[in-house]
Image (spheres, helix red, strand yellow):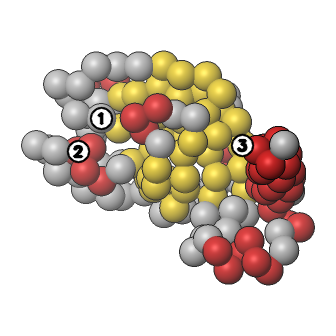
Amino acid sequence: MKNNKLVGLGLAIVIIIGYFVLNPGKQPKYLVNKYPFSIDVFKQVSLTTYTTVLNETDSTPLITASGLKLDSLNPKKHRVIAISRDLKELFSFGDKVMLSNAGIYNGIWFIHDLMNKKWKNKIDILINPNERQISLEGVVISKI
């Protein structure tokens, strides 16, 4: 009987927190104080990866659209995301974002590049050339 009450209480807490995560403008003070960042904008997108190889970039593969110069031996260390041009309404160069539902790419990244204009609602993660390319759907990108 006691365990059933604890499970019910836990479920209620998860539902309440879930509501405030999906409605970030309505976060109560105790949630805002618990986490060191707030989520301003979030969007569900497709994710792919890219490298600094010439056939995947423009003629300056070690310089992003924002002007950031990449380390040629380890470009992934910069944690760069390229966004499709339709996402420029929500995000700007230099924005710090959180990825979730992205597997090994979950965490904090920075917007420093743009994708080809043919792509919509998509982000590209910069990886090192020796890493395996992937594609994911349903990734959540949140501006923090």
In the displayed structure, 28 sits above or below 117; it is below
Disc 2 and disc 1 in contact, CB within 8 angstroms: yes
The residue mark sitting in front, 2 or 3, is 3
| Mark-to-mark CA distance, 3 and 1 | 22 Å
Quarter that holds the N terminus: top right
Taking the spot 47% from the left edge, 25% from the top edge, the residue there is 48
Question: Position of 53 compared to 80: left or right?
Answer: left
Return the mark for residue 75: 2
Taking the spot 55% from the left edge, 53% from the top edge, the residue there is 98
The front one of 100 and 44 is 100
Residue, disc 3: 43
The front one of 15 and 58 is 15
Taking the spot 58% from the left edge, 35% from the top edge, the residue there is 101
Return the mark for residue 127: 1
Amino acid carrying label 2: it is Pro
Amino acid carrying label 1: it is Ile
In the displayed structure, 74 sits above or below 48; it is below
| Mark-to-mark CA distance, 2 and 1 | 7 Å
CA neighbours of label 2 inside 10 A, class few (<14), some (14 to 19), many (20+): some
Q: Earlier in the sequence, mark 2 or mark 3?
A: 3
CA neighbours of label 3 inside 10 A, class few (<14), some (14 to 19), many (20+): some
Residue that extends furthest to the front in the rendered view of this protein: 1
Percent x, y of residue 106 = 47, 42
Helix, strand or loop at label 1? It is loop
Quarter that holds the C terminus: bottom right
